[in-house]
Amino acid sequence: MSSVAEPLLELSGVSHRYLDRFDALDDVSLRVLDGERLALLGANGCGKSTLLKILDGLCFPTVGSYRAFGQPVTEDALDDERFNRGFRSRVGFVFQNSDAQVFSPTVRDEVAFGPLNMDLDADEVEARVDDVLTLLELDDLAERACHQLSGGQKKKVAIASVLVMNPQVLLFDEPTAALDPRTQQWLIELLGELSRAGKTIVLATHDLHRLEEVADRALVFSEDHRLVADGSPTAILDDLDLLARVNLIHTHVHSHGTLTHSHLHGHGHHAHPG
């Protein structure tokens, strides 16, 4: 992709501290281009989820700036109803824990919640909801209570409640975590369809085995909350020293003193995500 293309999302020198003392991100700059599939990699606690929250306007840089679609995204900007509406309609976030996202009485109510809050007319909302329920094969569950759903079904409903808004940018936090193999495969295929439909996708993941299927580019974060690598999934996966240094794979020291890595599944042996 051409580096002269205007980024959809851009962080410049962003640091974020919780309670003014716990670092979550340290001097992170990045650009997300239109139509890109970008994976965020790093050990637990490195700042991936915080970065997604900043991209979604749920929290804000302590230092540095965030621009989306050419506009600064700040607390003040999001207090402006017109800006807020425009931003929220273009960026959607699927949380890691679907229980934090799915709260309406029925599946249909859950999926309709966002468009109703955008003041779309009732016919438009109904059409959108029906379309997305069909797309995600949730028709049979439309009247089911959300609390009765399995983990995989809740994940589908959470995704439906975001897709119904037809956002330009989709953010996913550990999308395949805690899903059964069939639902994982379904989700990876859905990500491919969304990408082919022109969506921009940013996802935080531990799943190195599926990285090349879900991303065109990968950013790697160290345990001290810094961005330490930016490259193609293949280049990142081949850099075993990097993956070991950021605690995404384990290293083994043999009795004769040599060091080997647990290689990646698909690139040799089996990796142990940190």
Image (cartoon, rainbow, N blue to C red):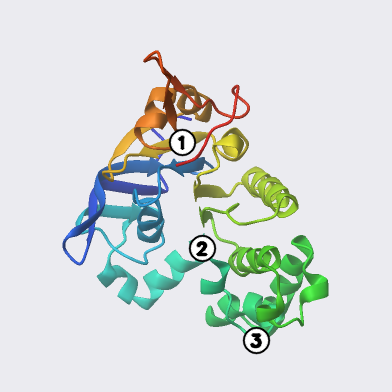
Label disc, if present, on residue 105 of the rendered structure: 3
| Three-letter amino acid code at the position of disc 3 | Pro
Residue 173 position, x and y percent, is: 50, 55
Q: Which residue is mark 1?
A: 218
Residue 3 visible, this angle: no
157 or 36, nearer to the observer = 157
| Three-letter amino acid code at the position of disc 1 | Ala
* Position of residue 7 in the picture relative to residue 190 (left or right): left
Is disc 2 in contact with disc 3, using a CB cutoff of under 8 Å? no
Q: Is residue 253 above or below residue 198?
A: above
* Position of residue 76 in the picture relative to residue 149 (left or right): left
- What residue appears at the point 48 percent right and 30 percent down from the top-left corner? 1
Toward which corner of the image does residue 49 lie, by quadrant? bottom left
> Which of disc 3 and disc 2 is earlier in sequence?
2
* Position of residue 178 in the picture relative to residue 44 (left or right): right
Q: Is residue 185 above or below residue 208?
A: below
Q: Is residue 154 above or below residue 39?
A: below
* Cα–Cα span, label 2 and label 3: 19 Å
> Which of disc 1 and disc 3 is earlier in sequence?
3
Label disc, if present, on residue 95 of the rendered structure: 2
Secondary element at tag 1: strand
- What residue appears at the point 71 percent right and 83 percent down from the top-left corner? 145
Residue 14 visible, this angle: yes
Toward which corner of the image does residue 68 lie, by quadrant? bottom left
Residue 193 position, x and y percent, is: 69, 47
User: What is the crowding at mark 2: few (fewer than 14 residues within 10 Å), some, or many (at least 20)?
Assistant: many
| Three-letter amino acid code at the position of disc 2 | Phe
